[in-house]
Image (tube, helix red, strand yellow):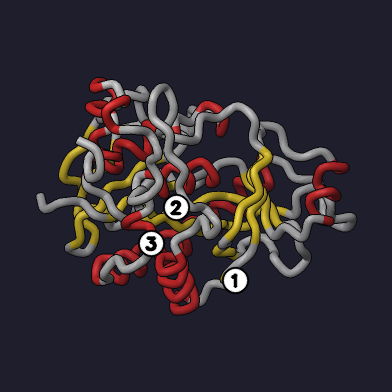
């Protein structure tokens, strides 16, 4: 099949993609280990797409157990240049209600145990990350959401926590004072690694609950989250399906496509050859 330029990462509640005609399942080994699952590579309305279940089919992996580097590296080896991500989040503001959708444009990192760079062990790189989402892709997702009739919001800050436990009440109230919009456990590392891999990345944050700050709502539970996710799944798939042709037609004029151009500071002669070989899909455009 033609090169796959568009990847989709399905989060909690979104383990498959309606309308995706399977061509093959690809198990991809990487220098960083195995991805979350096989990539479902197929045809979505005539457009090649690669779909990955973030937590694995059957939801087997904790957020802290996700091999983010392997997932993004594997997308890169498939030829993917754009990733559309979907994930469940808690609302940190009254205005975002369960089943609403937020397209955040900023992150705050509260994770502790996760590798989140391809660099190290003999090569140093520093990518610009002031604007962590690809604005053009967020715009495309948001436009599709409005067309599909979703209650959606463009912009906002996503605080990424470690998990797997939900927030304490004190933490939830603290994050509220920071002015954050939503809280989740997965998207930050994906965004960082996608930027290093020069892949455009944006996320669709599906609101499932009010975390535990809301005095008139029950505290967040898995049962409540899954009930909302089931209601959200159909809309999420409609938005993704409407966005794919939008993304397929665009020219990549954003900075994502050249994020590594001036980022690598290590003398190429000092980089071990094995490291060059392992990172060839990521750095090969600049260092041979």
What residue is pinned by disc 2? 85
What residue is pinned by disc 3? 255
* Quadrant hosting residue 44: bottom left
Does residue 156 appear to the left or right of 85 in the view shown? right
Marks 3 and 1 close (CB-CB < 8 Å): no
Does residue 74 appear to the left or right of 214 in the view shown? left
What residue is pinned by disc 1? 153
Return the x and y of residue 124 as percentages of the image width and height.
Answer: 43, 33
Q: CA distance from mark 1 to mark 2?
A: 16 Å
Q: Residue at x 17, y 40 (%)?
A: 24
Of callouts 2 and 3, the N-terminal one: 2
Of callouts 3 and 1, the N-terminal one: 1
Q: CA distance from mark 2 to mark 3?
A: 19 Å
* Quadrant hosting residue 144: bottom left
Residue 105 in sight in this render:
yes
Q: Nearer the viewer, mark 3 or mark 1?
A: 3
Does residue 174 appear to the left or right of 49 in the view shown? right
């Amino acid at each position: 099949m033609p090169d796959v330029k568009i990847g989709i990462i399905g989060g909690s509640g979104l383990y498959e993609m309606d309308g995706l005609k399977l061509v093959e399942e690809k198990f991809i080994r990487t220098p960083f280990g195995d991805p979350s699952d096989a990539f479902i590579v197929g045809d979505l309305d005539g457009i090649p797409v690669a779909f990955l279940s973030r937590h694995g089919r059957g939801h087997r992996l904790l957020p802290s157990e996700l091999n983010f580097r392997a997932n993004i590296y594997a997308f890169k080896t498939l030829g993917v240049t754009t990733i559309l991500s979907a994930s469940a989040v808690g609302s940190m503001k009254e205005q975002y209600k369960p089943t609403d959708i937020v397209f955040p444009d900023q992150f705050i990192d509260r994770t502790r145990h996760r590798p989140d760079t391809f660099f190290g062990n003999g090569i140093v790189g520093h990518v610009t990350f002031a604007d962590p989402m690809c604005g053009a892709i967020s715009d495309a997702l948001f436009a599709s959401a409005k067309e599909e009739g979703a209650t959606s919001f463009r912009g906002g800050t996503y605080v990424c926590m470690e998990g797997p436990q939900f927030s304490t009440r004190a933490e939830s109230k603290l994050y509220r004072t920071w002015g954050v919009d939503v809280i989740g456990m997965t998207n930050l590392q994906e965004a960082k690694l996608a930027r290093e891999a020069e892949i455009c990345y944006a996320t669709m944050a599906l609101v499932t609950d009010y975390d535990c700050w809301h005095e008139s709502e029950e505290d967040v539970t898995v049962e409540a989250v899954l009930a909302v996710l089931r209601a959200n799944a159909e809309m999420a798939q409609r938005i993704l399906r409407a966005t794919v042709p939008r993304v397929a037609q665009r020219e990549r004029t954003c900075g994502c496509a050249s994020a590594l151009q001036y980022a690598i500071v290590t003398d190429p002669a000092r980089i071990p050859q094995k490291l060059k070989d392992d990172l060839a899909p990521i750095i090969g455009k600049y260092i041979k």
